[in-house]
Amino acid sequence: MPLENVHPLNPGTGRGYTRAMATAAILDVDGTLVDTNYHHAVAWYRAFRRQGATQPAWRIHRHIGMGGDKLVAAVAGTEVERRCGDAIRESEGELYLELIDEVAPFPGARELIVELKQRVESVVLASSAKQREVDHYLDLLGARELADAWTTSADVASTKPEPDLVDAALSAVGAGEALLVGDTTWDCRAAARAGIKAVGVLTGGFAECELRDAGAVAVFECVEELRRDLDALPVVGGRASGTERPAG
């Protein structure tokens, strides 16, 4: 997908580019670097069904990427959340672990980390998944020696679309300016609320127009396409000025 009027993260020399302002790249993990969204949708479907609160799989998928603390009520309503929200979340965790060995990295995911490391000061892998899941993904990606930091559910008080995860990622490396790469509208909204820009990929199952409406400044079909066009990634203009976060 061609991009116009954008500047590279790594301006090089003698090419007429303005200096890029990004100091960190924040990479969402689930659905962006590793192919998990539909596994999670199946696990949530089975978890709802186990508690006698079956929901359409398409509706569940529309909320994948939202934190589990919010997903039950968003999908099934407050009465289901009150009655069995914790049980559904616990079941989803167990059911997802039965599927996790089927998860694979997206083509180009590790290479994206490597090449971003050449362009920005820090690369953070941002996840609100449990430690066991994040450890599995780090091993799949061979990223323990590549990433400057990563996050887990223990690092956030409130999940996406709240900005806590983005803030935790920035704090982990002491970055002030960053670009987030994500696959869902929830990623883009979290980035907007944290005052940074987001780039979207279609691997989470959300449409380009949805990602752009949620705040993505550019959208790529997949990680590999993004990696091939890194020099077209938009400049990060910085966090929102003042103390207020932009609406999102």
Image (cartoon, rainbow, N blue to C red):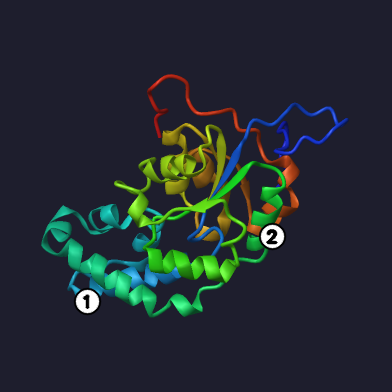
Give the residue at mark 2: 111
Q: What element does badge 1 sit on?
A: helix
| Label 1 crowd (10 A; few <14 / some 14-19 / many >=20) | some
| Label 2 crowd (10 A; few <14 / some 14-19 / many >=20) | some
Q: Position of residue 163 (x, y in %)?
A: 39, 40
Could you tell me if residue 207 is visible in this image? no
Precedes in sequence: disc 1 or disc 2: 1
Quote the CA–CA distance across marks 1 and 2.
39 Å
Q: What element does badge 2 sit on?
A: helix
Q: Is residue 162 above or below residue 222?
A: above
Please, which residue is most extreme toward the top here?
Answer: 242
The image quadrant of residue 202 is bottom right
Q: Position of residue 243 (x, y in %)?
A: 38, 22
The label number, if any, that marks residue 50 in the structure image: 1
Residue at left offset 16%, top offset 53%:
78
211 horizontally vs 243: left or right: right
Could you tell me if residue 119 is visible in this image? yes
Q: Amino acid at mark 1?
A: Arg
Q: Amino acid at mark 2?
A: Glu
Using the image as rendered, state which of residue 246 and residue 113 is in the foreground.
Answer: 113
The image quadrant of residue 17 is top right
68 horizontally vs 15: left or right: left
- Where the C terminus falls, by quadrant? top left
Q: Is residue 199 above or below residue 71?
A: above
Counting the numbered discs, the total is 2
Q: Position of residue 85 (x, y in %)?
A: 19, 62
Residue at left offset 56%, top offset 60%:
33
Using the image as rendered, state which of residue 29 and residue 4 is in the foreground.
Answer: 29
Q: Position of residue 230 (x, y in %)?
A: 72, 46
Residue at left offset 68%, top offset 52%:
226
